[in-house]
Image: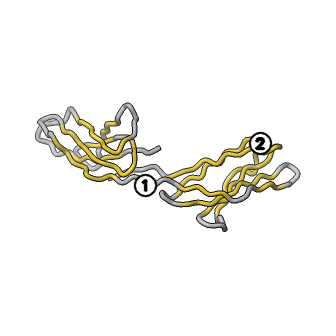
Amino acid sequence: MEDLKPVSAKILWKTDKPSSSIVAFGNDANYGTEIGNIEELITEHEVRLIGLEPDTKYRFKVKSADMDGNIGESPGKEFATPEKPIISKVAASEISMTSAIVAWETSTSITSEIEYGKTVAYGKNIIDKSLSQTTQHTVKIDGLESGVQYHFRAKGTDQ
């Protein structure tokens, strides 16, 4: 009942002269993956690591090469990705001819969103306009047709 975006991290650093932007990262000191831009020589670097696993510790180091081929490399550093929010206790209540209230809980603070429709393709959604994050969620669905079975799922986005 959840539809969460892949976990990502942004690595930022500066160099004293224009150079490439490479980040080596992985779950251990062997790193395993290198990503970045070797074509553009800049002094303010930003590399986004995407598709990371939730609740996982990663090691990384940055590498930059200038136009003469001199390579600078940082010491290894670590970061941990946040845990994946778990959605539970999803329930519909106060069901009337044209509305229903859906409530649910999450293990971490996320935004509140409901997808609903006459089939599991849903087709309609309601997003909490404040985009505030909470662990206790309540959304009222209005404008339902009387006598029709609806399908719904709870969603949300963390920080």
- Percent x, y of residue 130: 38, 31
Give me the residue at 69% from left, 59% from top.
76
Q: Check the image and report above or below for 79 versus 128.
A: below
Q: Check the image and report above or below for 10 versus 25.
A: above
Q: Name the quadrant containing residue 28.
A: bottom right
Q: Quickly name the residue at label 2.
A: 42
Depth order, front residue of 116/94: 94
Image side of residue 41 versus residue 109, left or right:
right
Q: Indicate the amino acid at tag 1.
A: Lys
Q: Quickly name the residue at label 1.
A: 84
Query: CA gap, disc 2 to disc 1?
Result: 35 Å
Q: Give the number of marks.
A: 2
* First in residue order: circle 2 vs circle 1: 2
Q: Secondary structure at mark 2?
A: strand
Q: Which one is closest to the eye, mark 2 or mark 1?
A: 1
Q: Check the image and report above or below for 44 versus 106.
A: above
Give me the residue at 59% from left, 64% from top.
27
